[in-house]
Amino acid sequence: MRILLAEDDASQAESIKDWLEMDGYSVDWVERGDHAILAVEQHQYDCILLDRGLPQASGDEILKTIRRQNSKTPVIFITAKDHIHDRVEGLDLGANDYLVKPFNLEELSARVRSQLRQHQAQAGQYLSFLDLQLDPQAKTLSKAGQTINLTAKEFQILYKLMQKPNHILTREQLEESLYAWGDEIESNAIEVFIYQIRKKIGGQYIKTIRGLGYRMHQE
């Protein structure tokens, strides 16, 4: 799953980014508000962590932009503004949660998981395709009731494909779901992950559309 972190304190941002990546998330980090707006316009995120005091565009402005797009992506304010008025104002603007600095990184992870659970419950928690059932929050996959163990990146690729089973996803779209900006990507990484997934679940579920990408396949 992919998270946008908008935080202008480099030290805090690095700590948060490293922590969330250890939890299995891909994290894009921006230091300026206008860059955050550009990111949400160009990419799809599962959760957004937003400092209210960003330069160039405030966290409040970014949140308003997100909600004007009718996006229901969970947004958590992470901020030093700790007055009750600030909290109420932030939540009334459309934030899903409000975390005051300094905070414990384990608590941040718990709040991210909580927001993802709520968002997935509203959208339908499980993804199903034929005899495959995928739980995005628990990060589990079963086939005909039997658990299939996938690596974090294998799971993310299958999750993206099962989200839109009738759509062709390009290699670039799948790479975007796996890697943060600046990550080094092997030229055949997606092909290798698809090969490993097919070995584990069977070759009939994912079809290669030559020259275009991949999609789920139902005969």
Image (spheres, helix red, strand yellow):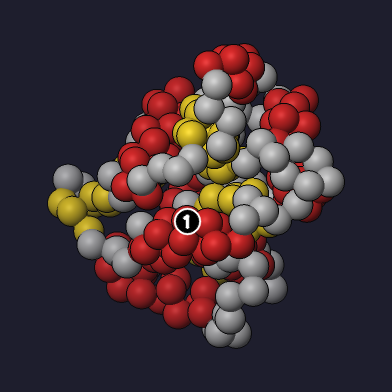
Where residue 209 sits in the image (x, y, percent)?
61, 67
Whether 213 is drawn above or below 60: the answer is: below
Left or right, 104 with reference to 3 = left
Residue sitting at x 64%, y 74%? 182
Residue nearer the viewer, 134 or 107: 107
Quarter-of-image position of residue 22: bottom left
Q: Label 1 amino acid?
A: Ile
Left or right, 145 with reference to 213 = left
Residue nearer the viewer, 135 or 204: 135
Residue nearer the viewer, 45 or 48: 48
**Total residue callouts:** 1
Residue pointed to by mark 1: 16
- Say whether residue 122 is visible: yes
Secondary structure beneath disc 1?
A: helix
- Say whether residue 74 is visible: no
Residue sitting at x 40%, y 59%? 19
Whether 166 is drawn above or below 206: the answer is: above
Whether 101 is drawn above or below 8: the answer is: above
Residue sitting at x 46%, y 61%? 15
Quarter-of-image position of residue 61: top right
- Local packing at callout 1 (Cα closer than 10 Å; few below 14, some 14-19, many 20+) is many
Where residue 163 sits in the image (x, y, percent)?
50, 44
Whether 210 is drawn above or below 40: the answer is: below
Residue lying at the far left of the rendered structure: 146
Where residue 156 sits in the image (x, y, percent)?
44, 58
Where residue 55 sits in the image (x, y, percent)?
78, 47
Residue lying at the far bottom of the rendered structure: 187
Residue nearer the viewer, 41 or 6: 6
Left or right, 92 with reference to 16 = right
Residue sitting at x 37%, y 49%? 105
Quarter-of-image position of residue 201: bottom left
